[in-house]
Amino acid sequence: MIKVEIDSRSGFCGGVIRAIGKAEQYLEKQPRLYSLGEMVHNEAELERLGAKGLITVRHEDMVRLPAGEALLIRAHGEPPATYRKVGELGLDIIDCTCPVVLRLQESILKAYQGLDGKGTIVIFGKIGHAEVLGLVGQVGGDAVVVENAGQLKEQFEKGAIKAPVELFSQTTMNPAEYETICNYLTSKGVALHAHNTICRQVADRHRLLADFAKAHDVIVFVSGSLSSNGRVLFELCRSANPRTYMAGTVADIDSAWFRPSDSVGVCGATSTPKWLLEEVARHISTLS
Ligand code: SF4
């Protein structure tokens, strides 16, 4: 019989729980709430919130919203230009920026002011990711964003990174890669102030998820296809356990992945709802 265990640390992070809670509270009294970008990178959860009245809009759609409508800013945060635009349009802001992201935005601005035109702000993050756009926006775009140590080396070699370096990270990045980036800059003798801004919840998850993946025969990683954190954590599980599979919902699960005596671990990204992990676990346990 297949044994199934859900990773107790998987599921929404605090920032996402807080944002969804605020949206649901609002929608208990109002018929609709606009969300600037997908509130969470999980299609199944978006469908659930959509049924309650949450409508996802893009930045370019904001101008078409009637003044007085409420617009939710996600846990990822937004650059100052967005707040200015929302103000001009007369929309009400429901600000769900995660307090951890808010502190990170403030630290980047402070470090930038401290550099006073000398040195470089380097952000380890996914180019074009909403959180990263919010971070870069704090300094009017005057920052170098790198997705990995290879890109950092490239930027350094072409002279785009000047010392001293104030190094920050998007909150959901891989701690091991962050270390590699720090080590590279140090090995080049660059004066470095490394602000380790990977969210504690994410860092702990990275550390413990590999152990969880090794402790089972098969891992089913549940994540929406748009989640960058999901892709990073999926790869981490796969390198610890080659029998790791990705599933967006129950419909993606293939019974050929399992043998009757397998122990199966079910885990997910910071954007994967707990109810979906439970649904997947229930489904797998009926396959034996
Ligand atoms: S990962 Fe951490 S910093 Fe990012 S939204 Fe979640 S709780 Fe906030």
Image (spheres, rainbow, N blue to C red):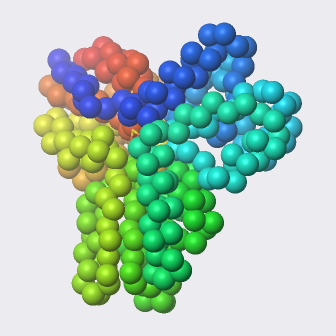
Whether residue 97 can be seen here: yes
Q: Residue at x 43, y 89 (%)?
A: 157
**118 up-or-down from 19: above or below:** below
Q: Residue at x 34, y 47 (%)?
A: 199
Q: Which of the two residues, 204 or 165, is positioned nearer the viewer here? A: 165
Q: Residue at x 51, y 61 (%)?
A: 109
| Quadrant assignment for the N terminus | top left
Whether residue 249 can be seen here: no
Image coordinates of residue 207 in percent, x first then y, are 20, 47
Q: Quadrant of residue 57?
A: top right
Q: Residue at x 52, y 44 (%)?
A: 76
**50 up-or-down from 105: above or below:** above
**93 up-or-down from 236: above or below:** above
The quarter of the image that holds ligand 1 is: top left
Residue that lies at the very extreme toward the bottom in this rendered image: 158
Q: Which of the two residues, 176 or 91, is positioned nearer the viewer here? A: 91
Left or right: where does residue 270 sit relative to residue 113? left
**276 up-or-down from 56: above or below:** above
Image coordinates of residue 83 in percent, x first then y, are 69, 46
Left or right: where does residue 23 sit relative to residue 152? right
Image coordinates of residue 279 in percent, x first then y, are 39, 18
Left or right: where does residue 39 sit relative to residue 255? right
Q: Quadrant of residue 26?
A: top right
Q: Which of the two residues, 239 or 140, is positioned nearer the viewer here? A: 140
Q: Quadrant of residue 138?
A: bottom right
| Quadrant assignment for the C terminus | top left
Image coordinates of residue 260 in percent, x first then y, are 19, 24
